[in-house]
Each structure stands twice: as C-alpha cells, then as structure tokens.
Image (tube, helix red, strand yellow):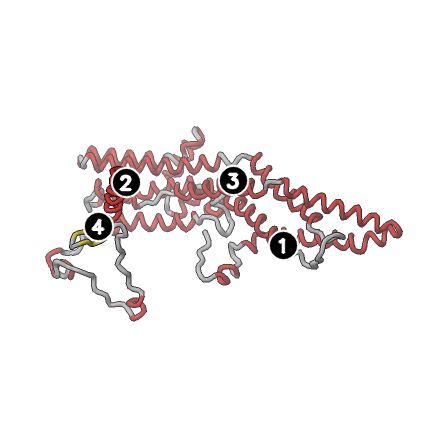
C-alpha cells in the first residue's frame, strides 16, 4: 500500500519503509566502493605500478578526470528524468483512478430492486457478488499480490466469490474466447437486471443509471488491462537509464580530487547528494511503473478487494433490508431548534482552541451598509479618472 506519512522535516526524513534511503542504498554503496577504488588507484596504485613515470601518469589521469567532468554537463539529465518521471507518475495516478468503487453501482441497484422479499434480496446479492467477482478476475491479471493470493481461478470458488457451476461455465467460455472471462459476471448481472425489468417494471431512469454505472465499471477494468498491455515505451526507459548511469560513471572520475583542485574532501559530499537526488528520482519512475506490484508504494489491490466486498454486501444485504429511523419521534435537535444558527460542540478544550475561523470574501467590502464589490468600485474609479484626463487634454 502507498506509504502514509506525517510529521516534521526530521520525522519524514528518518522513515525507512518506502523511503529514498531504501531505494538507493545498494546503488550508493556500489558507487562509493567504485569511487574509493579509483581514489586508491590514483593515490597509491599509480605510484606502485609506474614508479618514475608516476607523476606523468597522474597528470594524464587528472586531465582525464577534468575531461569527464566537462562531459557531465553535456547530458541533459534533469530534462530526461523530469519528463520520464512526470509521465510515469501521471500514468500511475490514472491507473489508481481506474479503480471503481462499488458504492456507485450498489446505490442505483438498491433503487431499482428495493424490495426485501427473498427473490429481490437474492438478485441484489448476486449482482453485488458478480461485480466483485469481475473485479477480482481482472485485478488478479494485473496484480502480482492478488495473483499470489488467488493463484488459480478455482481459489475464487474457495473464497466464496464464485460457485462451482459458475466456475465451469466461465472456464468453458474462457477456453473458447480467452478475453471474456472477466466480462462474463458483468454480463450475468445485466441479464439479472433484464429479468427484474420484465418482472417488476422499475423506473426507466433508475435502470438507465444502473446500466451507466455498469458500463463505467466495465470501462475501468478495460482501461487497467490497457495500461498493463501498453507500457512506457522501452526506448525511452532505456534512454533514461543509460543517461542516468552514464552520468554517474562520468562522475566517478569527474568528481575525483586530483591535482589542480583546491580542496580534497575525503568524503565526496556533493557527489553523494547528487547521487541520492538523481538515482532516487529515477527509482521513483521505476517503482511506479507497475503500481499494483509488490513494492512498498504499490497500490494494495488485495485490501481494496476485501473492502469492496464488505461494502457491497453491507449495502445490498444490510442497509437495504433495514428501514431508516422513524421520523415521527422528533429527536432531531436541529429540526426542533429551527431556525438554527450554529452547531453545538461537546469537544475538549483542545478542539475548542482549534475551532474554525469564518472566512471573508476579499472582493467584497461594506460601504454605508451596502455590500458592493471592491473590483467594481476600482473599475468605476479608474474609468472616471481616464475620462477626466481626456477632458483635460
């Protein structure tokens, strides 16, 4: 699940799960090992191997480092990473928005089938189950975590979302047309609604609303498949990867403290900061490429499925079967206190300290008891000034 966090600057930075430290520490360790290996080679290795020619080789090595440092400015890493990560994050957010919540379709379902007899209850219950079954079938195709939870379709029978008979029918249809497995439960829900329309003639507008929400659910699941099929173009990912790692390969030499530099820092602080920023930025794109995977910041479809199942059956089996509270008992404080000016508060002293402040309309001021827009007054004033200047001219 996407990591939730709060707190001050230090509390946010010291978190580990889903943090930049967890994302880059391995690469940073490899980078520092290579950096210090080159440093030892320059400080000690050249003297041991080349002997009398060591000074000349160090000078040549220093020129090479200066050249690599200049080459780092030729790679537009900020532009490449910014454009790449922007596209990936935008794609990640759109995939989350493709997750359809069952409240939108369960509410019109209860309006179309409002009765509490056994037949109506079973129809509502079955449609709710089919909606969640269709989502489970589609989501397990795009989420490794759900695939681990339900390795085979028969596991959905054990979970209670499908019966043995329904499993046999779905698998038989899947063998003929593989792309209709997740669509079949939605088609069954549509057929149940057709039977309800024939038997009880519900309001046509409510039926249309239900079909509209059913189509929206089908569209959302189809879009998830599209996002899974069509990824960010491989060539752009390769360009970004090559640019990032080529940049830091050049930095291994370009950031060395060789002859001609004023200050020799044993720890390359600036290089480490650059590495954390850019590699962390790159890792954001890599981790969010597949938002339903097993990373810390991936969207928890398993939890969402459990939540949707509980919500769906709670609406169609509990809320719809229970009548709303009696309106004649007159226990509504606001109704009995009409006209009400302000809600009461029974909060603690702390909650009273944080009570809201009434906002003001900054474009409106009170003049002589009348409320007039300030910007209109400014327009009139400026107009009169321009007219006066024109007349004077």
Q: Secondary structure at mark 2?
A: helix
| Residue position for label 3 | 83
Q: Nearer the viewer, mark 3 or mark 2?
A: 2
Taking the image as shown, residue 35 lies to the left or right of residue 354, namely right
Q: Outermost residue, left direction?
A: 328
| Residue position for label 2 | 389
Name the residue located 52 percent from the left edge and 47 percent from the top edge.
284
Q: Nearer the viewer, mark 4 or mark 1?
A: 1
**Label 3–label 2 contact, CB within 8 A:** no
Q: Nearer the viewer, mark 2 or mark 1?
A: 2
Residue 19, label in figure: none
Q: Nearer the viewer, residue 226 or 308?
A: 226
Residue 321, label in figure: 4
Crowding around mark 4 (Cα neighbors within 10 Å: few <14, some 14 to 19, many 20+) is some
Name the residue located 67 percent from the left edge and 54 percent from the top edge.
32
Q: Outermost residue, bottom direction?
A: 349
**Label 4–label 2 contact, CB within 8 A:** no
Q: Earlier in the sequence, mark 3 or mark 4?
A: 3
Q: Residue 272, position in %: x, y?
A: 63, 54
Q: Is residue 236 visible?
A: yes
Which image quadrant for residue 124?
top left
- Kindly report the distance in space between the C-alpha atoms of the residues bearing marks 2 and 1: 61 Å
| Residue position for label 1 | 270
Q: Nearer the viewer, mark 4 or mark 2?
A: 2
Crowding around mark 2 (Cα neighbors within 10 Å: few <14, some 14 to 19, many 20+) is few
Q: Is residue 123 visible?
A: no
């Amino acid at each position: 699940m996407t990591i939730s966090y709060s707190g001050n600057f230090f509390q946010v930075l010291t978190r580990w799960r889903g943090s930049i430290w967890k994302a880059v520490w391995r690469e940073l360790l490899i980078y520092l090992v290579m950096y210090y290996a080159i440093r030892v080679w320059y400080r000690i290795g050249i003297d041991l191997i080349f002997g009398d020619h060591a000074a000349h080789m160090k000078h040549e090595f220093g020129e090479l480092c200066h050249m690599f440092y200049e080459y780092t400015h030729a790679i537009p890493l900020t532009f490449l990473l910014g454009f790449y990560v922007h596209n990936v994050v935008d794609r990640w957010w759109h995939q989350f928005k493709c997750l359809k919540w069952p409240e939108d379709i369960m509410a019109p379902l209860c309006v179309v089938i409002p009765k509490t007899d056994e037949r109506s209850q079973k129809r509502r219950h079955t449609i709710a189950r089919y909606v969640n079954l269709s989502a489970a079938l589609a989501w397990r195709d795009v989420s490794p975590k759900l695939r681990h939870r339900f390795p085979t379709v028969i596991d959905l029978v054990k979970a209670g979302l499908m019966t043995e008979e329904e499993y046999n029918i779905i698998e038989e249809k899947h063998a003929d047309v593989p792309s209709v497995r997740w669509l079949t439960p939605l088609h069954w829900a549509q057929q149940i609604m057709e039977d309800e329309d024939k038997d009880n003639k519900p309001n046509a507008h409510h039926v249309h609303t239900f079909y509209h929400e059913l189509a929206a659910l089908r569209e959302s699941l189809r879009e998830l498949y599209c996002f899974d099929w069509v990824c960010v173009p491989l060539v752009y990912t390769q360009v970004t990867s090559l640019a990032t790692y080529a940049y830091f390969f050049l930095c291994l030499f370009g950031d060395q403290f060789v002859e001609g530099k004023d200050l020799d820092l044993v720890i390359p602080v600036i290089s480490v900061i650059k590495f954390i920023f850019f590699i962390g930025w790159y890792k954001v794109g890599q981790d969010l490429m597949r938002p339903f995977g097993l990373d810390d910041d991936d969207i928890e479809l398993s939890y969402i499925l459990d939540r949707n199942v509980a919500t769906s059956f709670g609406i169609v089996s509990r809320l719809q079967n229970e009548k709303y509270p009696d309106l004649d008992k007159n226990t509504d404080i606001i109704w009995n206190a009409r006209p009400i000016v302000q809600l009461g508060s029974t909060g603690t002293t702390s909650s009273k300290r944080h009570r809201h402040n009434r906002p003001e309309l900054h474009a409106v001021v009170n003049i002589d008891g009348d409320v007039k827009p300030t910007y209109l007054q400014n327009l009139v004033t400026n107009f009169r000034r321009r007219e006066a200047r024109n007349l004077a001219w």
